[in-house]
Amino acid sequence: MSADPTVPPEAPEEAAETGTLAARLALKQRAGGLVVPILTALLAFVLGGVVVLATGHNPLLAYRDIFNGAGLNWIFHPTTNIASTDAYNLSQTLLQTTTLILCGLAVAFAFRCGMFNIGGQGQYLVGLYVANWLGYEFAGMRPLPHILLAVGGATLAGAAWAGIAGFLKATVGAHEVISTIMLNWIAIWGGIWLFGDGGPLQNVANKSVPISNDVAASAQLPVFWGVQGLQGLDVGFFVALAALVVFALILNRTTLGFEVRAVGFNPEAAAYGGISVKKNLIRAMAISGAFAGLAGALDMLGYLYHFGTSDIPASSVGFLGIAVALLGRNTAIGTGIGALVFGALLYGTTHGLSSNVIDPSLAGNLTYMIQGLVVLFVGADVLILYIWNARRKLRPKSKSKTHPVGASA
Amino acid sequence: MADELVLEMRGIRKEFPGTVANDDVDLDVRRGEVHALLGENGAGKSTLMNILYGLYRADAGEILLNGRRVEFASARDAIGAGIGMVHQHFMLIPVMTVAENIVLGVEPRKGFLLDERTAEKRVRELSERFSLAVDPTALVSDITVGQEQRVEILKALYRGADILILDEPTAVLTPQEAHELFEIIRSLQADGKSIIFISHKLKEVLEIADRITVLRRGKKIETVQRAGATEASLARAMVGREVLLRVEKAPAQPGDVLLSVEDLHVHDERGIEKVRGVSFDVRAGEIVGIAGVDGNGQTELIDAITGLMKSEAGAVKVAGRELREASARKMLDAGVGHIPEDRQRRGLVLEFSIAENIALHDYSKPPDSKWGWLFPARLVERAGRIIREFDVRGGGPLSAAGGLSGGNQQKVVVAREIARDPKVLIAAQPTRGLDVGAIEYLHRRIVSERDEGRAILLISLELEEIMSLSDRILVLYEGEIVGEHTPDVSEQEIGLEMLGGRERPAA
């Protein structure tokens, strides 16, 4: 590293001692690398398995059937007819993954700016509503402009919704956790009013049910795997994959991302560097909300087409985005993988499981258990790092390429 | 009795991957002795003490306590054997009282409950015995840093420490507090306690220590008596070559006024007026030093000049142009460079790479970026150049700044500010916490930047630094400039003004 070979490297343990707690934690997390998220997930799955075991079933069989039920076994024989059950299951898993990628990015982006966006659910719902309204109201437009209008409108609506929380934080210091939770409830009850009896967006053809209008055919996203109108996998999947790339590019390749990361790591140093912290808080929240709003648009235009008031409180993908982002360490690749894991769980546990393999009342809840455990363990990151480092301490002679154990003392 | 050895460390070796932190180090400490452990950052002082305190295990060597061989598996073992350590960063619980903090873990109990009264009584006895004045019932969040340090010392004494390790104890103290600490150390010494005093400051080591052991790059260089040791001889042992302790500089040749501060008034966050009508000029090619005791408005003055804080009244002109409603961005663009007083809290984003930190001011301009699009390769390329030019060691452009040693972190900050070619350079505590070698480098650099024709405003709590670098000295007291001097003024005169003017004698 140093140009002069006669100069030995400075002892890193003393350098680390001068660091702040946050800096040391960041160094440790880097040292933990891939290990910690994998351990986190593994531990969550093992504990989920213990519960399966407690209900008198074999967890390995249960996980195997969830894996198969999610259609992931299709990858072992991808040449099979695309209309096979496995292929269909996989398309459904990927449909869930699409939504979860975007809801995960909504949480991850705010995290990178030092904020905890718990309002992904509300931003997703607002996107859903606006996409429904634009998709119905402007029926008769040519498909491409109609889709762009509805997707763009919903994305902006999600951005504005989250932007409120960012604005409140920047101006009066209201904590984003509180304000985004509040905004979630406003989004839920707002939707129930919009689509409910006598609501402005209630289905015009049938005034007896509290449900929205149907999205016009011109605004529906084309399906490329499966049957249009029967919940086939639509092109929104590629939009979500592209969003992962956009997320990584914004953060690492733009001045906007540079500012977001600087503010997220150290707002005081960012201000010293000439960066406006307030502007970035608002902007980062808005971009977060844009991802969630986009998720709502893709779901509405991709396969839902309409939404009833009873569906609103039942939806929880926005919250699942938190676990996705935490498991994915707020990175693009991590969020993609996290979304696939939870997408497979979400679909695999609610579909085609035999009661011989898993208690049916447990199956659907297994996803939420694992979600909760992941959030818990990520919170207990430090503990896992501690155990990991202690394990390495026991074998000091092992050739470790990461930071010396001294850095953790 | 006086020469009785209480501690011997023999042939201590400790390796970390890629470096040998301690290489065959010997250390012996006598009863009632203040033994200084001197060395640059990274010399292995902390490692050696962490081994003694049971935090690390030595790869080789032995420790003898009162002639008996001991092995510590944890700090608990070391404490049990009568060793106490006061770390640089205090480990107190702010919401608890002084007494509660001191007895924590070894509390006197009444049934299941803490016996508050006994705890307070014992703490009071202890603090009287060693003349360590603290109020046992005060909350730790309400006491000063100097008092927190006393609480840490009491904590160690309460656990029966006979050997007390003080890790860079003066780093966080004001000169007055440091003076009081030395009084405390002398009273502990009189009571037969042995003190290991870790430091890299030559002056204080010569003031307080009986014997001095110098470490360099993990090896013990020598153990000397204080009598006969000089700053120059210790510096040579520490750095391994002759060190210029005095800054050599030609007389200043001041040019145009580049920074002009006129009747500046600044309030802090709580609305208290901290800067009260300050006016001064800094010319091209001169170093103006601002001396003063911490908390007399230095921070607010710097923040107002650099646009990080709004001023209530007054003007700041850079090269003759007044900057109204100034922001940090405007000041940077007007040509003000700023080496901040706290490099880790403000000067660097520790999680960022060195390249990103060097781009912290200019990331939004070409060639770093265009139309909002960042060119990381250019950041890395420039950082590589600057790392070579400023001899930053311990990492390349892509290493995290947090992984560098303090001296190298400061080099990154200084390099960034100078590389922007500022008209005005504000250097706040530029050498705080750095070792002799790094200080020598920074001082030379500041003088050479002056000779390049920059206007330099130096703010430092170290009077010695102000005296040796400045071409003109201003004294700041309670938010006002109370004196202006040429550098041939006596230290006493300035010291008096720093403590509140001539009319009030220093306490």
Image (tube, rainbow, N blue to C red):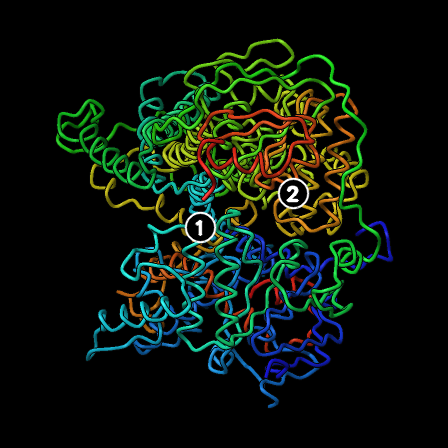
Which subunit holds the residue at mark 1? A
Judging by the rendered image, the residue that carries numbered circle 1 is A324
- Amino acid marked by disc 2: Thr
Circle 1 sits in a helix, a strand or a loop, which is it?
A: helix
Q: In the rendered image, is residue B52 in sight?
A: yes
Which subunit holds the residue at mark 2? B
Percent from the top left, x then y, of residue B235? 76, 55
Nearer to us in this view, B374 or A68: B374
Q: In the rendered image, is residue B297 in sight?
A: no
Percent from the top left, x then y, of residue B256? 71, 12
Q: In this rendering, would A100 be left or right of B452?
A: left
- Amino acid marked by disc 1: Val
Identified at 54% across, 73% down, the residue is A390
Percent from the top left, x then y, of residue B38? 68, 62
Q: Callout 2: few (<14), some (14-19), or many (20+) C-alpha neighbours within 10 Å?
A: many
**Above or below, A302 relative to B286:** below
Q: In this rendering, would A339 be left or right of B418?
A: left
Identified at 51% across, 32% down, the residue is B298
Determine the image quadrant of residue B121. bottom left
Identified at 40% across, 46% down, the residue is A321
